Amino acid sequence: MLAIGEFSRLTHLSVRTLRRYHEAGLLEPAAVDDATGYRYYRADQIPVAQIIHRLRELDVPLPEVRRILRSPDPDARGTLVANHLRRLEAELDRTRAAVASLRRLLQPEPTALEVELRAVPATTVAAIEDDVDHDDVVAWYAGAMAELDAFLGEPAGVPGGLYDNALFEKGRGHVLVYRPAAEPPHRGRVHPVELPAVELAVTTHAGEHDDIDVTYGELGAWVVANALAVAGPVREHYLVGPRDTPDAAAWRTEIGWPVFRVAPH
Amino acid sequence: MLAIGEFSRLTHLSVRTLRRYHEAGLLEPAAVDDATGYRYYRADQIPVAQIIHRLRELDVPLPEVRRILRSPDPDARGTLVANHLRRLEAELDRTRAAVASLRRLLQPEPTALEVELRAVPATTVAAIEDDVDHDDVVAWYAGAMAELDAFLGEPAGVPGGLYDNALFEKGRGHVLVYRPAAEPPHRGRVHPVELPAVELAVTTHAGEHDDIDVTYGELGAWVVANALAVAGPVREHYLVGPRDTPDAAAWRTEIGWPVFRVAPH
DNA sequence: CGAAAACTCTCCCGCAGGGGGAGGGTGCAC
DNA sequence: GTGCACCCTCCCCCTGCGGGAGAGTTTTCG
């Protein structure tokens, strides 16, 4: 039986951290002296400690680590770990996007932003909508658009989306994707929705969506500079996207921010 | 002038976060109403807010963000950002290593560990030593070994290292790298050191060092199972390494843990 | 054998960078 | 002028870890 210090030396985990893992139910010492509270470990707990160490290095939260350790089936473990690795990859994508945005922000192109003020009448469309977490939007969009396409057949007309501001400010919000349709069906999640008439400040974002937030910011600045204020969810129109061409440089996304004129006061 | 909520909508930063950034001196509102405390922003502060947002997505600490924003020269900015990107890459390496270790931990090979108990006499060597942070060890090692090689010429004899336990337990500790030398010189950081005689439990780790901690753990378990206890800094001998062959699979590292026999009590 | 050194215990506070919510004052539109 | 959305400050909570105090235990060594 090993005292905590010795065990710490063998696992490269600090004594403090071992105590925390005990408290969290991740790594129970093989024995605890009732009288003194001293923790004692067995040598065969070393690999367990190392698994925890490695998982923590991958930023797996402690409750998730517990779940992984408690699942005795190696396959189930593998699945949980693989899930987390997928999360890591998603994070890597976010990092890539942040780097792309930064490049554009730190070396701004002096080309003026082209913005069009466009009155859009109320329209009826085939839509799928839901409350979604910000991190899940991309996956949700893919699924929803696939379902829309399945029920509407032959892609025709420009697909679009409405994104509630809460999605960005609070991390969760209402999202709606749509395709124009003369007589929208009502099957599965697909149903007809009447988009209200709005006045949109519209600009076009070119290329991947990595740095689309920068375009959002420029549009926002334009809106304010023109004595307008934003109202309601943003609209995006996917003029050219991955469904049209694999060449990301050719993609075109319209961003439309509903606006109204601010009283000059 | 924009109230904080409007600015929040335009930048996709939460109101709370904007207030924190004000408090931290990252993003001062263009005006603050003395009477009410209301914060007001200008539209041209949107890009600044976005830069902060992106940098935070890259886990740049707030003080570092402040430093980047305060450096008006685009080049200086670029350098600071590039530094952080290098840190991100180092983290990626750590992640890769953790994944490799996990693979081995979760699907353990049943091959028995070969351990040799070896009495090592006191030896005089040419060494470089220092107190080093755990994260800097690899870089420090490269520099130290290069300096050793420069003064000793023709590589001969197996290089090695001593790593204090505190390095792993507290994140910082004493590290010593050495090469055998008949008459060690005393130049630059290089100086003669007499390594004390010890009894080592020795095993050999094959391949990259990604999962070397797993071998450490197995060796530790063996030591305990054989009624021994560890004492003093670990020794590593680089039998075959990157200096010998680029083929990582052929690398061989001896791990030697100083041990002494535990009284049967 | 006894004292000093090394170890271990619990408990409280700190950090980053946020979120949740209470309690109360403002701005604006109808 | 009244209601409602907005804004303010302040406090506590979260995660995962470190520092340190103060007290009790074990080990070691003379």
Image: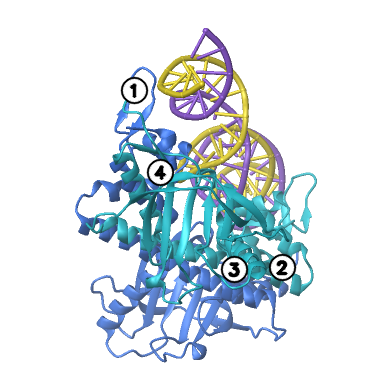
Chain colours: A cyan, B blue, C yellow, D purple
How far apart are the two marked residues, 1 and 2, measured between alpha carbons?
64 Å
How far apart are the two marked residues, 3 and 1, measured between alpha carbons?
48 Å
Q: Which mark is residue B10?
A: 4
Task: Indicate the amino acid at tag 1.
Answer: Asp
Kindly identify which chain the residue marked by label 1 belongs to: B
Q: Which residue is mark 3?
A: A85
Crowdedness near tag 3: few (<14), some (14–19) or many (≥20) residues, C-alpha within 10 Å:
some
Task: Indicate the amino acid at tag 3.
Answer: Leu
Res. B64 in view: no
Residue A116 position in % (x across, y down)? 34, 51
Tell me what residue is drawn at x 49 percent, y 78 percent: B236
SS of the residue at dot 2?
helix
Q: Are marks 4 and 1 on the same chain?
A: yes
Q: Image height check: is B193 above or below A5?
A: below
How far apart are the two marked residues, 3 and 2, measured between alpha carbons?
29 Å
How far apart are the two marked residues, 3 and 4, measured between alpha carbons?
33 Å
The quarter in which the C terminus of chain B is drawn is: bottom right
Q: CB atoms at circles 3 and 1 under 8 Å apart?
A: no
Tell me what residue is drawn at x 75 percent, y 70 percent: A76
Q: Which mark is residue B33?
A: 1
How far apart are the two marked residues, 2 and 4, measured between alpha carbons?
57 Å
